[in-house]
Amino acid sequence: MGLTVKSSYALRALYELSVMNAEGIKKVSIAELAKRQDIPRDFLEKIFSELREANILKSIRGRYGGYILMKKPKDLRLSEIVNILDKPLQSYECISGDCSFEIQCAVEFVWKRVHNVMMMELDKMTLQDIIDYGNRIAVINGGKTIEQ
C-alpha cells in the first residue's frame, strides 16, 4: 500500500542519526548507522542518496565525513519521507494513469481513499514523535532518554 522496508529502514536510520546528534555526534557515517540499526549498508546508501537529493540530509565527504540532518526532527514529517522513498500508490495501474479502463472504477476509489487516510496520519507525525516514542520506551525499560 505504499509503505515498504525502504521507508522503515529510513526512519530507523534517521532516528539513530537523531539520537547520535543529541549525544553530540554531529556527522555519522553510513557504516555506523547501518551497524547500529542492522540495515544492509548498500541499501542504506541508496536510501540516503535519495534523501540527500531531496535535501533531507547533507553528506560531508572525507575521512571525517558523514551525514547530517538538514531539518530539525520536529520539522521532518513522516509523510515527506514516505513520499520521497516509496511514492505511494505508484505501483497501482489504476492510480498511476496506466489503467486500461477508460473510466474510473471502484477499485481506484478504494486505493485513493486508503492512501489519503494513510498520508493524513503520516503527515501528523514527525521524526520528533519517533524520538519521543523511543524515550518513552527507554523509560519503561530503565534506559536513558535523549533531548532534542
Image: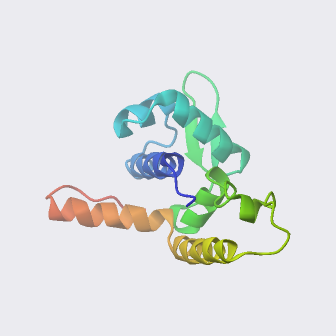
Quadrant assignment for the C terminus? bottom left
Give the camera-side residue of 60 and 38: 38
Give the camera-side residue of 89 and 13: 89
Give the camera-side residue of 9 and 72: 9
Evaluate whether residue 77 shows in this view: no
Q: How is the image coloured?
A: rainbow
Q: Residue at 73% of width from left, 64% of height from top?
A: 94
Residue at the extreme right of the image, as rendered: 102
Q: Give the image quarter of residue 81.
A: bottom right
Is 125 placed left or right of 56 in the picture? left
Evaluate whether residue 8 shows in this view: yes
Quadrant assignment for the N terminus? bottom right
Please provide percent x and percent y for residue 110: 61, 76
Q: Residue at 86% of width from left, 69% of height from top?
A: 102
Please provide percent x and percent y for residue 31: 46, 28
Please provide percent x and percent y for residue 10: 51, 48
Please provide percent x and percent y for residue 57: 62, 47
Q: Residue at 32% of width from left, 60% of height from top?
A: 134
